[in-house]
Image (spheres, helix red, strand yellow):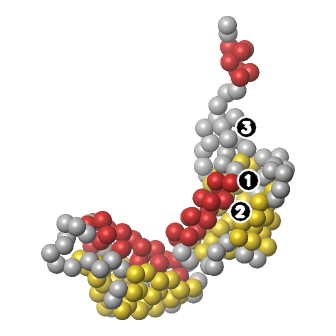
Amino acid sequence: MSKIGKKTIEITDGVSVSYKSPDLKVVGVKGELFFRLPKEIDLKIEDNKITVLQKKGKEDETKALFGLSRAIIANMITGVSKGFEKKLELSGVGYRAVASGNNLTLSLGYSHPVNVIGKEGITFSVTEGIITISGADKELVGNTAAKIRSIRPPEPYKGKGIKYVGEKVRRKAGKVAKTIGGK
């Protein structure tokens, strides 16, 4: 059995969970999320705690699904109560971002501005070259951040591009450093 899958999940205040096999619905302050459990996995909800269970006889086949299902449910409860966010940093001369509603417009040195339309449940905010993507669904927030980063990933020579806040970009010396070094 998975060590992660064995842990119980605490249902925080302000979060309601309803389960009709195989559909799980979690509702909270930040929104509502749905998850369809795999057919080999079951739930037990009692005393504001959720226990994820494997059906008998299929333990070897469902080890990965067991831990995965527990992690997804825990992230759903965290998402509807606190929410998730990813921060991206713009670095480059003339690189700008403007958030308007559910849309993000990026000026990244291309001949045209790049528009990113956020899916339902995603909000953008921009302050001084930092783009914040927030929402209740952890997977959707991460995928949106990765999609935005892939528009102009950081390049290794000057470090220009979009990177995660705190990400280290490994820099390379250019041709100038090679020619000065020797013949």
Amino acid on which disc 2 is placed: Ile
Amino acid on which disc 3 is placed: Lys
Counting residues from the start of the chain, the first of labels 2 and 1 encountered is 1
Q: Mark 3 sits on what residue?
A: 158
Image vertical order of residue 183 relative to residue 129, above or below = above
Q: Residues within 10 Å of mark 1 (few under 14, many from 20)?
A: many
Q: Residues within 10 Å of mark 3 (few under 14, many from 20)?
A: some
In the rendered image, the residue lying farthest to the top is: 183
Counting residues from the start of the chain, the first of labels 2 and 3 encountered is 2
Which element type, helix, strand or loop, lies under badge 3? Answer: loop
Q: Residue at x 35, y 86 (%)?
A: 22
Q: Mark 2 sits on what residue?
A: 131
Q: Are marks 3 and 1 in contact (CB under 8 Å)?
A: no
Q: Quadrant of the image for the N terminus?
A: bottom left
Which element type, helix, strand or loop, lies under badge 1? Answer: strand
- In three-dimensional space, the C-alpha distance between marks 3 and 1, rounded to whole angstroms, equals 13 Å
Q: Quadrant of the image for the C terminus?
A: top right
Picture coordinates of residue 125 (x, y %)?
73, 69
Q: Mark 1 sits on what residue?
A: 90
- In three-dimensional space, the C-alpha distance between marks 2 and 3, rounded to whole angstroms, equals 20 Å
Counting residues from the start of the chain, the first of labels 3 and 1 encountered is 1
Amino acid on which disc 1 is placed: Leu
